């Protein structure tokens, strides 16, 4: 097998594309995939200031690296989750990545607000991933809004999107299917545009890019991820992909192209903008936003009060 | 050969020449879900690994709250 571009010895073979690449040819190929998703989805331009959510994992650091290399103006945002050594290592990797490249980085530490994930999950009896998702999404919106960013980029990849799509379909979550797209425009004055430029590249492709670019990322899995439903869906999809390469890409790409617009058109809730949370002013579909509802559960236990 | 799998961290000793595809099958790792690394180089499924190799099998699947 030879590199499809230069015939050199390949290091990456992509079954879904039936193509092999050497190190020198793979890196620009990956960056072109990201650029194509950015431009075809009209996600952002090189004049925009993009806030990139960086966890310290391969996807978000690969995304930040690719955006910077492609000439986009970026700042990083790391939300530290307060999960012991795992969070400490994650933060260290992100800070080193930013420092080595001279990139601006904002760090928002949930523990500073008394909202470290282990304590929140234990007090509220919510699954850690659920509490973490609520707190991280709120922090992304809040920090982006406060610092005047119009665009937030996250490192969700093809496998994340395929697992989410499978989960939404298995339970016919039509409201979620109507909102599952790689670009979400703001529907509230405090919201920013959210983009997912890695949505058509697989975890393997992202990991290979991070490795070949020499990016030092957190290889360890979050200690709370074990048993997460998303991993079950990913495993099922990986088995299908092994027998039928390209299925994941077709599943997600054709959903965006053909099915998602139908769900969006038939879902009236998609058109109803959120109102303002009565406690913090951020977007809410009820009197309180999901974040303030979580704080309300924490408050009687002596936890943090609303912002 | 010594094979380091992670995550989670686990090291296994294997003997005998085999392809990367055979190695992954033996370890129960699906194609496309891990990178196979030897001396800072990514290996393909058709590449061969030998007794004196030090191999890293680094899983690429992550998940939780995405």
Image (cartoon, grey):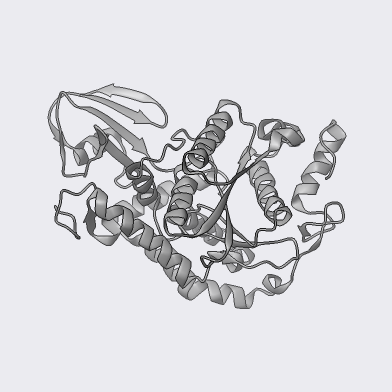
Can residue A12 be seen from the camera position used here?
no
- At x 38%, y 65%, the residue is A250
User: Who is closer to the viewer here, B6 or A73?
Assistant: A73
Assign the C terminus of chain A to one quadrant of the image: top right
Number of numbered discs: 0
> From the viewer's perspective, is residue B58 above or below residue A5?
above
When asked about the image quadrant of residue A200, the answer is bottom left
- At x 17%, y 58%, the residue is A6
When asked about the image quadrant of residue B3, the answer is top left
Question: Would residue A83 appear left or right of A46 to someone viewing this image?
Answer: right
* Residue A44 coordinates in the image, percent (x, y): 54, 66
> From the viewer's perspective, is residue A178 above or below residue A155?
below
Question: Would residue A178 appear left or right of B36 to someone viewing this image?
Answer: right
- At x 24%, y 32%, the residue is B39
User: Who is closer to the viewer here, A275 or A75?
Assistant: A75
Question: Would residue A297 appear left or right of B28 to someone viewing this image?
Answer: right
Question: Would residue A177 appear left or right of A192 to someone viewing this image?
Answer: left
* Residue A36 coordinates in the image, percent (x, y): 41, 67
When asked about the image quadrant of residue A219, the answer is top left
> From the viewer's perspective, is residue A298 above or below residue A229?
above
Q: Residue furthest front?
A: A102
* Residue A11 coordinates in the image, percent (x, y): 23, 46
* Residue B24 coordinates in the image, percent (x, y): 26, 37
């Amino acid at each position: 097998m030879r590199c499809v571009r230069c015939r050199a010895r390949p290091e990456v073979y992509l079954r879904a594309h039936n193509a092999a690449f050497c190190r020198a040819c793979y890196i620009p190929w990956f960056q072109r995939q990201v650029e194509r998703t950015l431009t075809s989805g009209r996600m952002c331009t090189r004049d925009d200031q993009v806030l990139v959510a960086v966890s310290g994992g391969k996807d978000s650091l690969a995304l930040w690296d690719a955006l910077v290399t492609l000439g986009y103006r970026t700042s990083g945002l790391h939300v530290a989750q307060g999960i012991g050594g795992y969070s400490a290592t994650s933060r260290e990797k992100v800070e080193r990545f930013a420092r080595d490249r001279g990139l601006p980085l904002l760090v928002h530490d949930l523990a500073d607000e008394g909202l470290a994930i282990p304590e929140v999950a234990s007090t509220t009896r919510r699954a850690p991933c659920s509490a973490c998702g609520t707190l991280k999404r709120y922090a992304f919106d809040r920090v982006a809004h406060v610092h005047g960013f119009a665009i937030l980029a996250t490192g969700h990849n093809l496998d994340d999107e395929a697992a989410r799509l499978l989960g939404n379909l298995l339970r016919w979550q039509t409201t979620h299917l109507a909102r599952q797209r790689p670009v979400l425009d703001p529907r509230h004055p405090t919201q920013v545009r959210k983009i997912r430029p890695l949505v058509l590249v697989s975890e393997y492709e992202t990991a290979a890019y991070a490795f070949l670019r020499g990016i030092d990322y957190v290889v360890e899995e979050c200690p709370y991820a074990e048993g997460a439903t998303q991993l079950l869906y990913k495993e099922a999809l990986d088995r299908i992909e092994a027998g039928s390469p390209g299925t994941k890409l077709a599943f997600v790409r054709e959903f965006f192209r053909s099915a998602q617009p139908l769900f969006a058109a038939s879902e009236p809730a998609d058109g109803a903008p959120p109102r303002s949370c009565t406690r913090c002013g951020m977007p809410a579909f009820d009197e309180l936003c999901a974040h303030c509802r979580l704080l309300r559960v924490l408050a009687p236990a002596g936890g943090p009060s609303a912002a | 050969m010594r094979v380091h799998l992670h995550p989670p961290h686990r090291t296994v000793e294997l003997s005998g020449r085999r392809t990367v595809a055979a190695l992954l099958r033996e370890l129960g790792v699906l194609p496309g879900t891990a990178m196979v690394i030897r001396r800072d180089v990514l290996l393909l499924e058709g590449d061969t690994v030998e007794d004196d190799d030090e191999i890293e099998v680094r899983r690429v699947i992550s998940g939780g709250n995405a």
